[in-house]
Image: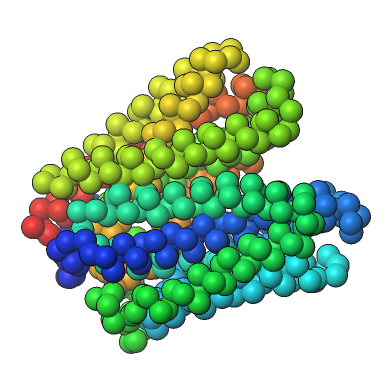
Amino acid sequence: MAGPAVISDEPGPERTSAFGWAVFALSFGLLMSDHMARQVLNAAGPQIQAEWNLNNAELASLASVVALAVGLLTLPLSYLADRYGRVKSLVAMATLWSLATLAGAWVENYPQMLAARVLVGVGEAAYGSVGIAVVLAVFPVHLRATLSSSFLAGSVVGQILGVAVGAQVAAVYGWRAAFGVIGLFGLVLALIYPLVVRESRLGVPPKREALNWRELGRLLVGRPVLWLTYFAGGIQLFCTGTLAVFLPILLTRHYGMDLTQAGRTTALFLLVCAIGMVGCGMLVDRLSRRRPAITPRLSIGFSLSSTALFAGAFFSPPGPVQLALIAAALLVVAGITGVTGSMIANCTPRSIHSTSMAVLALAYNLLGLAPGPYVTGLLADRFELLDALKVLPIPCLLSALAMAFARRPYAAEMAIRK
């Protein structure tokens, strides 16, 4: 096992500032816009499907191509942002996905909409990783867990608003108006962003020269603490990805709710998850400020709590107790995002934070958010949905195990940074 590497890095600002909070607010708003642009399709999907006589596969492909573009382009676009400037990259991305969403209001057929959705995915591909790197650059190190989790909570808020606003506008004015409203919201924020956020004030000048690829690989994945952290964060989000898809089905099938009620209840559960992300991040920063090496232990606590709560929920019959346990589990399960964002930021240089956060985002998607619904769906087809959901404690246990192995190397790195 390789020893800890010394990361030569500037610590960042010593205290918070009005500029920092303005950067956070605008970056959070754009992340909301990012996910609203994704979710408006789900809100308007039934109207589009009826108007163009699309089959289910064609409708689903309009969402899938966004995820495909994001998955393929996250790393290369994040690397380019580190080299050529994060602010201009963010503005270009937000402008592209907003214009592509606006274009969706004028397309006339399925191929044109498919092309517009591809462009939405290209624009959104690296926003999450570059956006969090910009936010972390203007705040003190001891707030990294809070900021990582709070920023990522914007994706959950965006999902909720995308469905709620999109459905409301589509119901009154039609689906084209829904695309137009959400596209305009992102475009306005994209125009304001560079007026407030300046590259020169981030304290992280772009690395114009290309890094040695072997050195870049070492900095990103070359130490056990890094890949253990990536794994822990990704595998635990298996649970959130699964529940985002299957909670509405659980509520309609086993609780007798209609689709509207199930959708609203699911939105409340997602809101609980977002609140938990922020709260857990704040707790991590508070407890680890004087003892940074304690961070993996807190993650283990979140994972083991999630294990117990999910086991209690899905080994219980449907009813109020089960719903309460699911809500309690969602309150802590995504607390891993603050932990992993903070640990990866502390273990990689600020100059490549966009790229390292892109690797973390890939882990979130490839290990958790993407396979979670698919694997659970396969099990639900073979058995019962409630039986399939009984697997959710397992990824939480694996996350706890990975963090147990990460404790010592992380403590060693934090000791060197002192």
Colouring used for the render = rainbow
17 with respect to 33 (left or right): left
Q: Is residue 26 above or below residue 254?
A: below
Q: Along the horizontal axis of the image, is 179 left or right of 3? A: right
Res 396 visible: no
Position of residue 14 in the picture relative to residue 95 (left or right)? left
Q: Quadrant of the C terminus?
A: bottom left
Look at 86% across and 67% down and name the residue there. Answer: 109
Q: Position of residue 177 (x, y in %)?
A: 74, 62
Taking depth in this image into account, of 26 and 345 the one nearest to the observer is 26
Residue nearest the observer in this picture, 126 or 377: 126
Residue drawn at point x = 70 percent, y = 62 percent: 179
In this view, the residue farthest toward the front is 172
Q: Position of residue 317 (x, y in %)?
A: 58, 12
As drawn, is 220 to the left or to the right of 322? left
In the rendering, at what x and y percent does residue 300 appear? 30, 34
Residue at screen point 50% across, 70% down:
189
- Above or below, comparing residue 246 to residue 232 in the picture: above
**Occupied quadrant, residue 379:** top right
One can see residue 104 in this view: yes
User: Number of callouts in the render?
Assistant: 0
Residue found farthest to the bottom: 209
Expressed as whole percent of the image width and height from the top left, the position of residue 168 reads 70, 49
For image coordinates 39% across by 61% down, the residue present is 25
Task: Judge by depth and name the residue closer to the eye, 192 or 247.
Answer: 192
